[in-house]
Amino acid sequence: MPGIVRLRLQRLGKKKVPFYRIVAANSQAPRDGKFLEVCGTYNPIASQDGAKEVTLKVDRLKYWISVGAQPSDRVAWILGKFGVMPLAPQRYNPQRAVPKKDHTNN
């Protein structure tokens, strides 16, 4: 059995200058290894005007989702921002970062 297909980021670019491809890949394949199809790109480094560049092959992404591909957290966030799929619920809870009151009697 080939395993589950995941939509995930494949890192390219130089050290400290990341650039990512959004790929459909077997879940057991290495992060930067063999993939089935390139479905877009993501450049997290903001350009001069402050925009982060994203290109998506929406028809291919919808196809992979329809056949059961599972997006990674970051890819799900990107696809939610561009309306390809519903926005995933936020996993980070800022209330957990607040220190709790000290209940010891000093």
Image (tube, grey):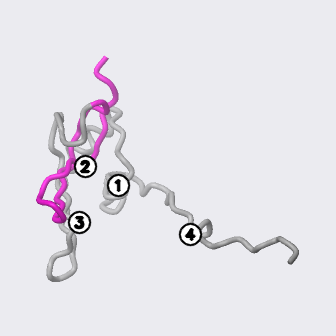
The residue lying at 19 percent from left, 51 percent from top is: 11
Q: Is residue 6 magenta?
A: yes
Q: Nearer the viewer, residue 76 or 16?
A: 16
Question: Sequence-wise, which precedes: disc 4 or disc 3?
Answer: 3
Point out which mark residue 84 bears. none
Q: Could you tell me how far apart the alpha carbons at marks 2 and 4 are, in whole angstroms?
A: 26 Å
Q: Is residue 4 magenta?
A: yes
Q: Nearer the viewer, residue 60 or 39?
A: 39
Q: What amino acid does circle 4 point to?
A: Pro
Q: Which range is magenta? A: 1-28
Residue nearer the viewer, 47 or 39: 47
Return the disc, 2 or 4, that comes first in the chain's sequence.
2
Q: Pointer 1: what residue?
A: 74
Query: Residue visible at 35% across and 54% down?
Result: 74
Residue type highlighted by circle 3: Pro
- Please tell me in which quadrant of the rendered image residue 44 appears: bottom left
- Residue at the spot 28% in from the left edge and 45% down from the top edge: 8
Amino acid type assigned to the residue bearing label 1 in the image: Arg
